[in-house]
Image (tube, rainbow, N blue to C red):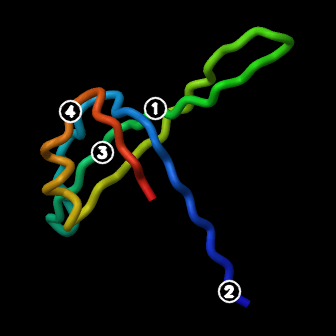
Amino acid sequence: MAFLNSVQLIGYLGKAPMPFNSKNKGSEFSMASLATNEPVSNEGAHKNIVEWDQLIVYEDTLCIAKTLKKGTQLFIE
């Protein structure tokens, strides 16, 4: 039996993606952080809980990552 876990994130970049080169294989990738907000109300008080997710971008999507800036809204699937 096969299972599939799928995640969809909508959030804002914490800073511009940082490019890296892999020392072992010479492949290029970028790392970035994505902030997602979850609105919570508790006994009439409203607040947002912020969670930070780390993103690693490889190969085909790397050219898109190079154009992103801090504060850019992203949808990741």
Task: Residue type at mark 4: give it.
Answer: Lys
Closer to the camera in the image, 58 or 44: 44
Mark 3 — residue?
Answer: 31
Camera-side mark, 2 or 3: 2
Residue 38 x/y as whole percent: 62, 30
Residue 65 lies, with reference to residue 61, above or below; the image says above
Task: Residue type at mark 2: give it.
Answer: Ala
- Which numbered disc, 4 or 2, marks the residue that appears first in the sequence? 2
Residue at image coords 24%, 49%:
30
Camera-side mark, 4 or 3: 4
Mark 2 — residue?
Answer: 2
Residue 18 appears left or right of 44: left
Mark 4 — residue?
Answer: 69
Residue sitting farthest toward the top: 45
Which quadrant is home to the C terminus? bottom left
Mark 1 — residue?
Answer: 35
Residue 19 appears left or right of 13: left
